[in-house]
Amino acid sequence: MKNARFPGRNLALAVALVCAALGPIHLFAQSLSADEAKSIAVDAYIYGYPLVTMEMTRRVMTNVATPEGSRAPMGQFARLREYPTAAFRDVTTPNADTLYTIAWIDVGREPWILQLPDTHGRYYLFPMLDAWTNVFKAPGKRTTGTGAQTYAITGPGWKGALPEGITPYESPTAIVWLLGRIYSSGTPEDYAKVHKIQDEISIVPLSAYGKNYTPPRAQVNPTIDMKTPVRTQVNRMGTSDFFNLLAKLMKDNPPAATDAPMIAKMAKLGITPGEPFALDKLAPDIQEALRDVPKVAFEKILAHFKSAGREINGWMVTTETGRYGTDYLQRAFITAMGLGANLPQDAVYPSSSQDAEGKPFSGANQYVMHFAKGQMPPVNGFWSLTMYNEQNFFVDNPLHRYTLSPRDRLKKNPDGSLDLYIQHENPGPEKASNWLPAPKGKFNLVLRLYWPAEKPPSVIDGSWNPPPVKKVK
């Protein structure tokens, strides 16, 4: 079997190596003005933000000796037995519609074998994300059906023999995030059925396939911050720390061939795969110009909200998720707002932070989201409306209710339409089943549409759009 951790065929990596071979990188930077250097650094930050965020997320989610809750060591599954609560902080905009079955694996040295059991028609989705947040494969009910399946996830450029009956999936990077989701109605009885499916899902290295395999107990790193949200940890990183980590990660998680121009641009500042970033070797004025790059770049990422999709009825609807090509700003924005986003064919997530009049949502007001008869979300899977606070985490409330969906036995109006009540105070027994509790302050909403309809009306082509959320006068 060939170890392809350093695939020479990668054009972007080759460009970086050529630039490194030409001499000390700070000589290139000497020909740049402070403004030019800062512009390159901002672009480089946006480019690398997903890779660094994925790594910091991986560190936190795998820094345990044995699986516990939403965390598990590398090469082992974390099987969430219930929906996340308001205390969950591992990733932003979590969902409370499916039970996660999550694993991080390193396929740089050898493939890993993933076995998925028969779910007997139950909806599930098992996207595989590379280290840059791209979904490179998405087995599940939509794509591969619900029968038993076995896959070999291989590293970039790996060559070797696999046992018969195993489908190979090649990852573009060494690090892979398996972000499985299995639908559940949330009742104790249904949880038990999903738990059985979860327990039958397995992942083992190829060298252990077909043998009695016990995952090793992992070493816990006490220096890793396990309390601060990952996004906060990333945003706190200084320029030097961020670019040093980015350069280190690009060695084992090679950029795509289409990234070659960006890699060449970054090399002008000394940001190259596998090489330390020597900020102190740059000219003093450039060093000073680069100090606030993380802050400036992240503000630019957040400002992309208005361009991330189409705005309609107070909602931002984007179908550019899961695969991004060279749209680095879109990729960084989705990373910041909802790490682990699916392909649009699997899920679309319209989001909103304002009412029909364009004013920010506030728990001081009462709102109604009205679906006319025959205008319910067109999906082959399921839909839900989820409440988040300003930081895009769940909102604690007496009902421990974070979403509304048809499984909540929503009450329709006599004419067949549906009203959802979004407010802080309980609207009373007649409306409680349709109530989505809000915080006292600002909040955000996400409408999840799993396996959207392919033909009109469809959210993908814009022939269906979410209705506005209107403030009650």
Image (cartoon, rainbow, N blue to C red):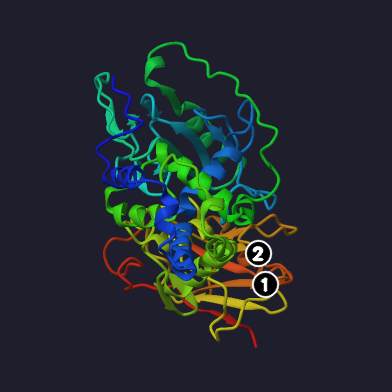
Q: Is residue 103 above or below residue 246?
A: above
- Do the numbered discs 1 and 2 sit on residues whose CB atoms are within 8 Å? yes
**Which image quarter holds the N terminus?**
top left
- Count the marks: how many? 2
Give left or right: position of 217 versus 440.
left
Estimate the x, y position of residue 217 in percent, counting from the top left. Answer: 60, 20
Image coords of residue 56 (percent x, y): 56, 44
- Residue 426 in the image: state x and y as whole percent: 73, 69
- In this rendering, the answer to whether 23 lies above or below 30 is above
- Near-viewer residue (288 or 4): 288
Question: Of all residues shown, which one is farthest toward the bottom?
Answer: 473
Q: Secondary structure at mark 2?
A: loop
> Which residue is situated farthest in the top direction here?
212
Task: Choose top left, top right, bottom left or bottom right for residue 223.
Answer: top right
Q: In the rendered image, which residue does mark 1 sit on?
A: 442
**Which residue in the structure is indicated by mark 2?**
389
- The residue sitting at 53% across, 83% down in the picture is 356
Classed neighbour count for the residue bearing mark 2: other residues with Cα under 10 Å, few (<14), some (14–19), many (≥20)? many
Q: CA distance from mark 1 to mark 2?
A: 7 Å
Amino acid type assigned to the residue bearing label 1 in the image? Lys
Mark 1: give few (<14), some (14-19) or many (20+) Cα within 10 Å. Answer: some
Amino acid type indicated by mark 2: Asn
Q: Is residue 250 visible?
A: yes
Q: In this rendering, does residue 449 appear at all?
A: no
Q: Is residue 341 left or right of residue 65?
A: left
- Residue at x 39%, y 58% (from the top left corner): 321
